[in-house]
Image (cartoon, rainbow, N blue to C red):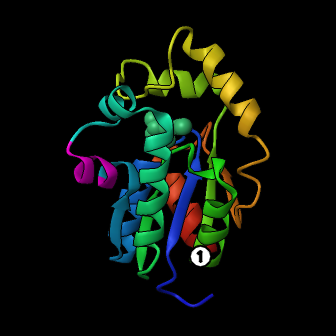
């Protein structure tokens, strides 16, 4: 694979995309892009505020637009939001403009990792139930990844090492 190809991290919330993306970008000296953070910056508010003010479909539009725009460049590590795979066209554009790595984890571990975070508007009510439901709904959507890492029992540094070994 030609080096300088984008590395694109996909997967459920709480699988470690943002932390691992940061580590990968440092190792490779690639630009770090967090699509959620870029949308927040463009919209001038947090993701939960955006969901409340304009709704999920507005967020999905903004997210897809941002994804396409960042994928015009190379040599980046891109952390995406967990729901970016809900649109088939996003999966296509990721697949053809980068090396797509899916991070997975057991639902109980995800719940532990996201507990105490108030920036996940989709986690209303019983968090573990919601995560199991969302995972079930999306389980096929993450399968197009070129490489998958189960992060359940791994540290972010170990996940980073595995990804670099396969890049
Ligand atoms: C979402 C995940 C979030 C964020 C938004 C929606 C999802 O990103 O994009 O709250 O649909 O799974 P993280 O995966 O970084 O938490």
Rendered residue at 58%/26% (across/down)? 109
Membership of 51 in magenta stretch: no
Pick the front one: 115 or 122: 122
Which quadrant of the view contains residue 93? bottom right
- Report the quarter where the N terminus lies: bottom right
What residue is shown with label 1?
Answer: 167
State which quarter of the image contains the C terminus. bottom right
Can residue 8 be seen at all in this image of the molecule?
yes
* Bounds of the magenta segment: 38-44
| Secondary structure at numbered mark 1 | loop
Side (left or right) of 155 relative to 105: left
Q: Quadrant of residue 26?
A: bottom left
The residue depicted at 49 percent of the width and 57 percent of the height is: 64
User: Which of the pair 30/137 is nearer the observer?
Assistant: 137
The percent coordinates of residue 138 (x first, y second) are 72, 39
Q: Position of residue 65 (x, y in %)?
A: 44, 61
Q: Residue at x 62, y 24 (%)?
A: 131
Please say if 157 is above or below 153: below
Residue, x 39% and y 76% (percent of image)? 28
Q: Main secondary structure of the magenta part?
A: helix
Q: Is residue 84 placed above or below 98 in the rendered structure?
A: above
> Is residue 130 found left or right of 38 in the rendered image?
right
Residue 156 lies left or right of residue 129; in this view the side is left
Q: Which image quadrant is residue 54 in?
A: top left
Rendered location of residue 23, percent (x, y)? 38, 59
């Amino acid at each position: 694979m030609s080096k300088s190809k984008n590395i694109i991290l996909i997967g459920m919330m709480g699988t470690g995309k943002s932390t691992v993306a940061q580590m990968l970008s440092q190792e490779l000296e690639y630009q770090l892009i967090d699509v959620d953070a870029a949308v927040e910056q463009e919209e001038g508010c947090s993701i939960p505020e955006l969901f409340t003010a304009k709704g999920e479909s507005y967020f999905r539009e903004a997210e897809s637009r941002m994804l396409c725009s960042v994928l015009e460049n190379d040599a980046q590590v891109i952390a995406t939001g967990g729901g970016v795979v809900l649109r088939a066209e996003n999966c296509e554009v990721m697949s053809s403009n980068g090396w797509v790595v899916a991070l997975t984890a057991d639902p109980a571990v995800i719940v532990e990792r996201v507990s105490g975070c108030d920036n996940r508007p989709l986690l209303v009510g019983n968090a573990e139930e919601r995560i199991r439901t969302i995972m079930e709904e999306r389980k096929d959507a993450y399968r197009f990844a070129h490489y998958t890492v189960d992060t359940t029992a791994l540290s972010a540094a170990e996940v980073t090492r595995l990804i670099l070994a396969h890049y």
